[in-house]
Amino acid sequence: MRSKRPTVNDLNTLGVTFCHAGAYDLAIAQLAEAARLAPDAAVVRSNLGAAYYGKGRFADAEREFRQSLELVPTRAAIRRFHGRCLVRLGRLQEALEEFRWVLEHSPDTWEGRSAREEIWAIQGEEQPWPPVRVRST
């Protein structure tokens, strides 16, 4: 009996599991294969971006988040992660644009509060309340 080939969903799920465990190389391998099989799957692209980010490969992460945003431009979480990549790459003006978009479109969400803090950090402003706890990616 032949074993079944993993589906895009199988590869994505395994990649996310590896990413959450901090096994970024394994996550990247699974998610890159999923992205090869389904290049227009925004969730796969953003998960691959998160794995690259965790590995410290910020240019690769930025590319994946950008590609994901081309497919679903209204996802605040992806925009915030894209902004974080841009900060790491020293592209602060572009990062501010992403964080401002998130703040404008999702002001009362965790993403919006986090984006506000990112803006303050870039602009060197003091925060009027304790920072939001950062969730692990």
Image (cartoon, rainbow, N blue to C red):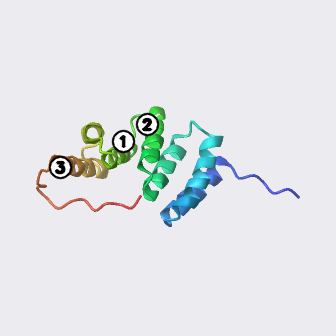
Three-letter amino acid code at the position of disc 2: Leu
Q: Judge whether residue 120 can be spotted in this image.
A: yes
Q: Are marks 2 and 3 in contact (CB under 8 Å)?
A: no
Q: Secondary structure at mark 2?
A: helix
Three-letter amino acid code at the position of disc 1: Arg
Residue at the spot 25% in from the left edge and 37% down from the top edge: 93
Q: Residue furthest bottom?
A: 21
Q: Distance of mark 2 from mark 1, alpha carbons?
A: 7 Å
Q: Judge whether residue 17 can be spotted in this image.
A: no
Q: Position of residue 71 (x, y in %)?
A: 48, 33
Q: Residue furthest right?
A: 1
Q: Between residues 7 and 34, which one lies in front from this camera angle? A: 34
Q: Distance of mark 2 from mark 3, alpha carbons?
A: 24 Å
Judging by the rendered image, the residue that carries numbered circle 2 is 69
Judging by the rendered image, the residue that carries numbered circle 3 is 120
Three-letter amino acid code at the position of disc 3: Trp
Judging by the rendered image, the residue that carries numbered circle 1 is 79
